[in-house]
Amino acid sequence: MSHYVVCGGNALAHRLIRELIEQYEVPVVALVPDLTQDHGPQISQIPGLSAVHEYPTVSAEALRACGVETAGGIALVDGTDEGNIHAALAAANRNPGIRIVLRMFNQRLGEHLERLLPNCAALSGSATAAPAFANGALSRPNSVRVGSRYLYVAYDGEIQDNQLCVVADRIDPQDLGRMRLLPQTAGRAAEFIALARRFGDEGEYGPRSLEEHEQRGGIAALQALTAEPPVRIGWWARIRWWLLDTLRFFTSARLRLLLTIAVVAVLLSGAVIWYSTGHLGWALYFTLLDMAGAASPDQPGQTVPGGSWQRVAQVVITFCGITFVPVATAIAVEALASGRRGLPRAPGAGTRDHVVVVGLNHLGTRVAGMVRESGVPVVCIERDPQARGVAAMRALGVPVLVGEAPLAGQLLRARAQYARAVVSVTRDDAANLEAALEARALQPDVLMILRLFDDDFAHQVYATFGNVVSRSTSYLSAPGFASALMGREVLGTLSVYRRVLLVAELTAEPGSGLVGRSVHDLEEPGGVRVVAVRLARLPAEYQWNYPDRARLLAEGDRILVATTRSGLARLNNDQDAA
């Protein structure tokens, strides 16, 4: 059996090696830049690893030591985009038939590389994991698009009667070890019977048995929507965000203060004239003319309805109107000549209901961009001023707080006490937990989405906090990298707390072990649910919840499955079996 080479010493390399050994049972050789740094020590201790080589770069000597000439595939999941491309080309030159999977932040560049190397897949771990973090911050379910539908996971009372299958039961956030992902069932009908019992009048979700349900734990089901769930934002909030963002873009803090004082003075003076004249129309007439500098002074002895107060108000309006012209000129010069786009700026005092993103690495940059695209304001915090995401976010006009200042002070400047969610995605679990604790001190009810690698640590966080969502980038993306390395395609991943549900589409190719097997045969061992079938004679039509579970798959049929990591590995082995 050909071996597979994994190059990298980060969390993704660690998860990917374990995935290949435990789920696909293939020989793996690890190429680690430093066995004493990052995840190098943990990688060297993985049981079943064929060999470990330490080289600072993926050089020709390193590839030779790993036996790339006889390898079935190589995964490049560390380093820069340029370095990974160089290593991929070197591996392809030494072994033209090798399967290459490389991590690329620049997805456009990755597409060009895939066309250049036909046996290559360029994936982005941050792009795979970012939707789970962004959707968690926006309080909407993460979804995977399949055809014209969006698949997502619903929990307990959110489950509707159009659910596709039960994906987990015995869910207890205080003890996630009790949860069963894709539990075995006697048949598809058993899932619907169980749902009817749970959600019926006498079911465990009824008023008579709520306490019993809390003891047993909840359930989760896979559902489909015809459109991606929208972010519900009130029209007034959108207008306020737009106005504040426009003002912050075109003006500095001093100009905004001057404009605010002038506008307030004009409004108060206009109110005085209205009170004096008793007529709104005349008040607007005098106010607009005075602002335009067209006021004519009263002569001695001339009487006006408001007396001295109206004269004072008109003088104030006239001088405020005179200030608007130079202020407008200053704004135009500042915006056009010097340019404010890309310059550092802090969030304004009116920032509310926004999302705070801590850490502008690849993942944080993508999460902040996705939240901003949804229409929700974003404020970012990053310690390293040279981080790649700092310039990218500032170019989009997103406020970024940079520096080594204490995190508590940075969160306060980011107005986390008024935020809808705080997303901490640094590479340090302890730093992410610190962000959660500091944000909780400012606002006890704030939603927190944390990037945590260690599963035991994450379970303790779940048991302690009531408003926290934990995700692992490597856990979300490693199955997709492993499947691509084995020549398969994963459409997307869905999180069920700390577990991962994979959505994949497989083809019953000629000579494949899937030909001649039924839906019931594929699901019976557990870990797999066939949610849709595309028949060879109707390739464009998804038949959801295919009713004929005994029909044998023919050549060219395609099945859409929701599966665990072990379930996908079993299907891949079946697909390769002759």
Image (cartoon, rainbow, N blue to C red):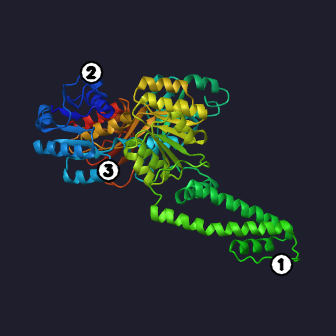
Q: Bin the neighbour count of mark 2 within 10 Å (Cα to Cα): few under 14, some 14-19, many 20 and up.
A: few
x then y, percent, for residue 307: 87, 69
x then y, percent, for residue 555: 25, 47
Write down the residue under mark 1.
299
Q: Amino acid at mark 2?
A: Gln
x then y, percent, for residue 565: 34, 33
Write down the residue under mark 3.
107
Give the mark, 2 or 1, whose residue is nearer the N terminus: 2
Write down the residue under mark 2.
45
Q: Amino acid at mark 1?
A: Gln
Quadrant in the picture for the N terminus = top left
Which residue is rendered at x = 24% and y = 51% of the image? 114
Q: In front: 268, or 423?
A: 268
Q: Amino acid at mark 3?
A: Gln
Q: Secondary structure at mark 2?
A: loop
Q: Secondary structure at mark 1?
A: loop
Cα separation between marks 3 and 1: 74 Å
Please indicate, yes or no, whether residue 211 appears anywhere in the rendered image.
yes
